[in-house]
Image (cartoon, rainbow, N blue to C red):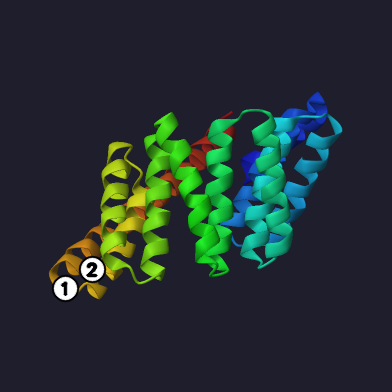
């Protein structure tokens, strides 16, 4: 986060509004990951206003999408729907096909949260159609995983299993550890409901392995940062 604030200070001096909006958006995303959603909304709103002021349609779509994600986390569904629909309108006009795939996927998750599974399925199928067409394996893994979760919530465990397995296959190809962590946790729960106790246990072990791998990577990055800061400070002392 401190690196983004440093970047923000630089952009203030350079007077590059488009880049400033991107940095503000990234700060908002980090606050969102930390569940500091009020702060996230504040930074996404600032990014949104800048993109509006310079007529940056791409930046506007990104800011609206990010803002909607934070609003969903706070249960502000009506505001989030409005922003997602605005994203869809912008990306449709710009023929931003991959952007539309993201828009449909994200609004589908909102309706899944609201337990409006019919509408969620409609948007997920639209997202899937686009992502198959552009053949982005990483985003395809996301949509298949989300479809699996939807059918899991509908207690259609057989259908969910096939979708989770497809998501695992794709996520492995792009080495998406975070996605694999999530999918193995979900397919473990799904297997329990199918009475596949041994499979559920094996999937749960894989979930734990990927979770620990992610945690260890984060710890290693933090340790490296501490070591670099220590070395930098020692060099300053010598100088």
Which residue bears the numbered disc 2?
A: 191
**Residue at the spot x=56%, y=51% of the render?**
106
Viewer-nearest residue: 124 or 31? 124
Quarter holding the C terminus is: top right
Q: CA distance from mark 2 to mark 1?
A: 7 Å
> Badge 1: how crowded within 10 Å, few (<14), some, or many (20+)?
some
The answer to whether 58 is drawn above or below residue 169 in the figure is above
Indicate the position of residue 105 as horizontal and vertical percent values: 52, 49
Residue 181: numbered disc: none
The answer to whether 16 is drawn above or below residue 119 in the figure is above
The answer to whether 125 is drawn above or below residue 130 in the figure is below
In the picture, residue 173 is in which quadrant?
Answer: top left
Which element type, helix, strand or loop, lies under badge 2? helix
Q: Are marks 2 and 1 in contact (CB under 8 Å)?
A: yes
Indicate the position of residue 61 as horizontal and vertical percent values: 69, 39
Classify residue 148 as left or right of residue 118. left
**Tag count in the figure?**
2
**Residue at the spot x=58%, y=36% of the render?**
99
In primary-sequence order, the first of circles 2 and 1 is 2
Indicate the position of residue 103 as horizontal and vertical percent values: 59, 45
The single residue placed furthest to the right in the displayed view is 53
Residue 197: numbered disc: 1
**Residue at the spot x=33%, y=57% of the render?**
183
**Residue at the spot x=73%, y=31% of the render?**
57
In the picture, residue 92 is in which quadrant?
Answer: top right
Q: Is residue 111 visible?
A: yes
Classify residue 217 as left or right of residue 29. left
Which element type, helix, strand or loop, lies under badge 1? helix
Q: Is residue 7 visible?
A: no
Classify residue 189 as left or right of residue 79. left
Indicate the position of residue 53 as horizontal and vertical percent values: 86, 33
Viewer-nearest residue: 233 or 141? 141
């Amino acid at each position: 986060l401190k690196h983004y604030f440093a970047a923000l200070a630089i952009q203030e001096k350079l007077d590059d509004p488009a880049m400033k909006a991107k940095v503000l958006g990234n700060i908002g995303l980090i606050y969102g990951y930390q569940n500091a959603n009020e702060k996230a909304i504040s930074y996404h709103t600032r990014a949104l206003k800048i993109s509006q002021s310079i007529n940056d349609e791409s930046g506007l779509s990104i800011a609206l999408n990010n803002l909607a994600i934070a609003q969903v986390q706070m249960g502000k569904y009506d505001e989030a729907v409005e922003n997602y629909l605005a994203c869809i309108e912008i990306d449709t006009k710009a023929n931003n096909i991959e952007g539309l795939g993201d828009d449909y996927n994200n609004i589908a998750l909102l309706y899944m949260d609201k337990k409006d599974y019919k509408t969620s399925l409609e948007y997920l199928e639209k997202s899937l159609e686009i992502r198959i067409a552009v053949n982005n394996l990483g985003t395809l893994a996301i949509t298949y995983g989300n479809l699996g979760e939807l059918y899991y919530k509908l207690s259609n465990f057989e259908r969910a299993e096939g979708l989770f397995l497809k998501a695992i296959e794709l996520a492995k190809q792009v080495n998406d550890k975070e996605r694999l962590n999530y999918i193995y946790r979900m397919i473990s729960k799904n297997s329990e409901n199918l009475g596949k106790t041994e499979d559920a246990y094996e999937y749960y072990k894989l979930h734990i392995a990927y979770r620990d791998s992610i945690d260890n990577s984060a710890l290693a990055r933090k340790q490296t940062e501490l070591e670099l800061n220590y070395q930098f400070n020692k060099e300053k002392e010598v100088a």
